[in-house]
């Protein structure tokens, strides 16, 4: 098992790592929209936050030497279900034709007041 850490995504804000690689599976911790360069949430709207979260997620996946098509499962947490269509469109734009299994859950609150958090599981043969 290997812990994955990259400067191209925000450092963990607790007792966890950005991701764990088990050899053929990668478990990416929930990412919130912290800009790794500023260390802050730069965008206050769901569009900007969703894009930042996806950049963070994909940078971790890339650092672990997995690819976009290795994503098998994604879970999205949002604080306002009314943002579903916006999030879904951005998600679709970022993933293209790749369609991993997915759950989207509406929650009361997320760390640091973020509007969205996404985690992922990747698999490769």
Image: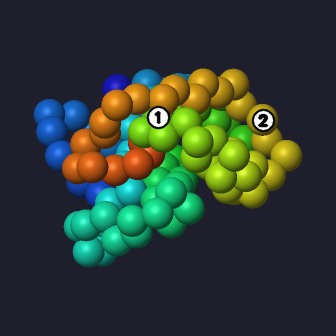
Question: Mark 2 to mark 1: distance in Å?
Answer: 18 Å
Is any part of residue 62 visible from this angle?
no
* Residue behind mark 1: 77
Residue 23 left/right relative to 36: right
Q: Residue at x 75, y 57 (%)?
A: 93
Of badges 2 and 1, the one in the foreground is 1
Question: Which quadrant does the N terminus fall into?
Answer: top left
Question: Which quadrant does the C terminus fall into?
Answer: top right
Q: Residue at x 31, y 36 (%)?
A: 109
Q: Are the residues tagged 2 and 1 within 8 Å (C-beta)?
A: no
The label shown at residue 12 is: none
Q: Nearer the viewer, residue 20 or 114?
A: 114
> Circle 1: is it few (<14), some (14-19), or many (20+) Cα within 10 Å?
many
* Residue 64 place in picture, x, y as percent: 47, 46
* Residue 91 place in picture, x, y as percent: 67, 49
Residue 30: quadrant of the picture:
top left
Residue 13 left/right relative to 52: left
Mark toward the start of the polypeptide (2 vs 1): 1
* Residue 4 place in picture, x, y as percent: 35, 44
Residue 110 left/right relative to 106: left
* Residue 77 place in picture, x, y as percent: 47, 34
* Residue behind mark 2: 99
């Amino acid at each position: 098992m290997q812990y994955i850490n990259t400067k191209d995504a925000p450092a963990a804000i607790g007792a966890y790592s950005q991701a764990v690689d088990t050899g053929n599976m990668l478990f990416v911790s929930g990412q919130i929209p912290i800009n790794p360069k500023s260390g802050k949430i730069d965008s206050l709207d769901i569009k900007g936050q969703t894009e930042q979260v996806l950049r963070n997620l994909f940078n971790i996946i890339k650092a672990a030497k997995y690819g976009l098509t290795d994503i098998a499962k994604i879970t999205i947490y949002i604080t306002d279900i009314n943002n579903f269509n916006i999030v879904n469109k951005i998600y679709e734009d970022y993933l293209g034709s790749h369609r991993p299994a997915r759950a989207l859950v509406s929650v009361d609150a997320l760390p640091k007041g973020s509007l969205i958090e996404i985690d992922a599981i990747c698999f490769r043969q």
